Structure formats: structure tokens, C-alpha cells
Amino acid sequence: MRRQRLPFPRDPYWLDARFPGQCSKCAAPIKTGAPIFYYPNSKTIFCDGEDCGKHEARQVEAALFDERMCAV
Ligand SMILES: [Zn+2]
């Protein structure tokens, strides 16, 4: 199932950090193997905090939902 139109050039997604990093929002350190929300387009990562990755994920889900509703 592929979407016809994408709100983002590439969809962000959850993955496990392959190297240590830092949350783009709260600046929390991210350990290898920690769940992160990753934007391939901007190479931005967020931790899985409610105000960070989970918040971003909800925004993306909402955008994709609207996109699907508008497409039909
Ligand atoms: Zn964070």
C-alpha cells in the first residue's frame, strides 16, 4: 500500500538508535539501542519522550490521516 501524495519527502519513522546522539527537542542524550523517532529527510532525531518523539509521531499520523482523507 503506497500513498499517492506524501506530506513529507520521506516519512519519518521509529527506529532503534544505531549510535549515541542527542534529542533535537529536549537535548536529552540518546543511547545506542534506544527508540528514536527519525526524520530521514532532515536527519533529525527525537527521543521517545511524550513531548518529543511521541509528539512528533502524533503530528505525522494526523498529517498522513488528513492526506488519506483528502485523497479519496
Ligand atoms: Zn527529547
Image (cartoon, helix red, strand yellow):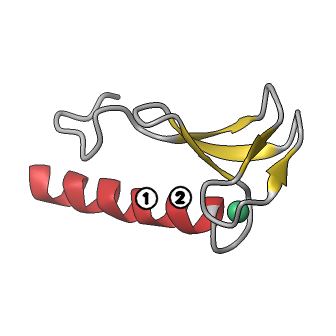
Query: Is residue 47 visible in this depiction of the protein?
Result: yes
- Name the residue at 71% across, 45% down: 36
- Name the residue at 48% across, 41% down: 12
Which residue in the protein does label 2 denote?
57
Q: Are marks 1 and 2 in contact (CB under 8 Å)?
A: yes
Whether residue 10 is situated above or below residue 50 in the rendered picture: above
Residue 57 location in percent, x, y?
A: 53, 58
Q: Quadrant of the N terminus?
A: top left
CA distance for labels 1 and 2: 6 Å
- Name the residue at 88% across, 34% down: 32
Question: Position of 41 compared to 7: left or right?
Answer: right
Residue 42 location in percent, x, y?
A: 43, 37
Between 69 and 30, the one lying in front of the other is: 30
Q: Quadrant of residue 23?
A: bottom right
Query: Is residue 72 visible in this depiction of the protein?
Result: no
Question: Position of 25 compared to 22: left or right?
Answer: left
Which residue in the protein does label 1 denote?
61
Callout 1: SS? helix
The amino acid type, in three-letter code, at marker 1 is: Glu
